[in-house]
Image: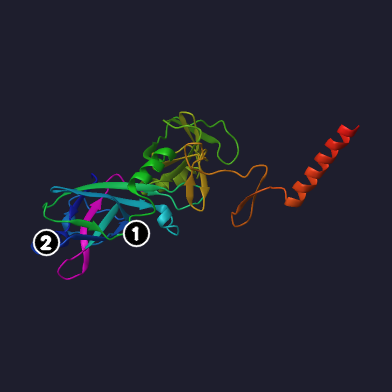
Amino acid sequence: MDYAFKPTTNGRAVVTACMALKAPLDLTRVAVGSGRVAKDTDLADVHQLLHYEAEGSVGERRHENDRFYLTVQYSNRDNPDVPTFLLSEFIVYARHPATGEIVDFLYATLGDYVQSVPPCSMDFPAAVWNFPLTMVLSDEIDVFISAPAGLVTYDELTAIMNRMAVRQLDLLVPAAGWTTDGAGTYPCRLDITLDVTESMIPVLTVLPQSTADASDCGLAPFAQTLDGTLRLWAERVPQKDIHASLALLRDSSGLTLVGGALLTPATPEQIGGVKVGPGLNVTEDGTLSVDMASEEDVAQMLDETLSGGKAGEEG
């Protein structure tokens, strides 16, 4: 099943009312879930998530002629208490211009492309997903968003994502190709050729259809990236291929996490983070000061210098 979305019947009624009243389209909130609709389901008739997980947000949005471009976003940093889940659906809500009621506007399913969402950790950069949507509306309708736009703008978020090189991909862990010459708790090892580097941090999540197979072979709950290789371990060689989702988080080298914000090192051309070096002091509240001699110290040094100089001349 493919990634797809459709305005719901309530959403169509909202658009019709906006046209009749010449009122703006007011999108109020986004919610994401882990439910999966049946393949033959008419998405226009889905008015609530099958399994609610957390709140999303609206990212990029623009209205050009009869086209409305909208990006739905989800960030685990916005939902710090939500554990790992498989993001497979989302719903956007709108305000009905005539009644003021908040109703479902559109429903989307990710189909077979579910996204494994790790829990929030301040030790790693935020995991963010973007889902672009395009709708055809009358060019007489104005569109504005009253839902929060998230922690950063879309362009800022895209720049951070590119810099951090956060990637997610579906992974099939094969039953063939394992070596059993290791020792310890996980004597079986598998190397999978992938476009990865040693600096990346892998987060492997077994998909529901393979949890029993992963448990049977004792698949290790960790993985390792080498240049060009993903390395996995297990207690026993698996009897079946294991379906998983792999998130690759880039090492934060070159970036500093300060109060939840990512700072690049300062340069002569760019504002950024700095470290306190010799001659500088910093207090617990972050106040920076310079080691400077007092007026008394300066006067004493001058007296000593001048006195020494006069004594030399007289000698």
Q: Going by the image, does 207 lie left or right of 200?
A: left
Q: Earlier in the sequence, mark 1 or mark 2?
A: 2
**Res. 47 in view:** no
Frontmost residue, 136 versus 167: 136
Query: Residue type at mark 2?
Result: Lys
What secondary structure is marked by label 2?
Answer: loop
Magenta-tinted stretch: 95-115
Q: Residue at x 43, y 56 (%)?
A: 83
Instruction: Locate the C terminus by quadrant.
Output: top right
The residue pinned by badge 1 equals: 55
The image shows residue 259 at horizontal and vertical percentages of: 51, 53
The image shows residue 21 at horizontal and vertical percentages of: 10, 64
Frontmost residue, 261 versus 282: 282
Q: 167 above or below 103?
A: above
What secondary structure is marked by label 1?
Answer: strand
The residue pinned by badge 2 equals: 22
Q: Nearer the viewer, mark 1 or mark 2?
A: 2
Residue at the far right: name it.
Answer: 315
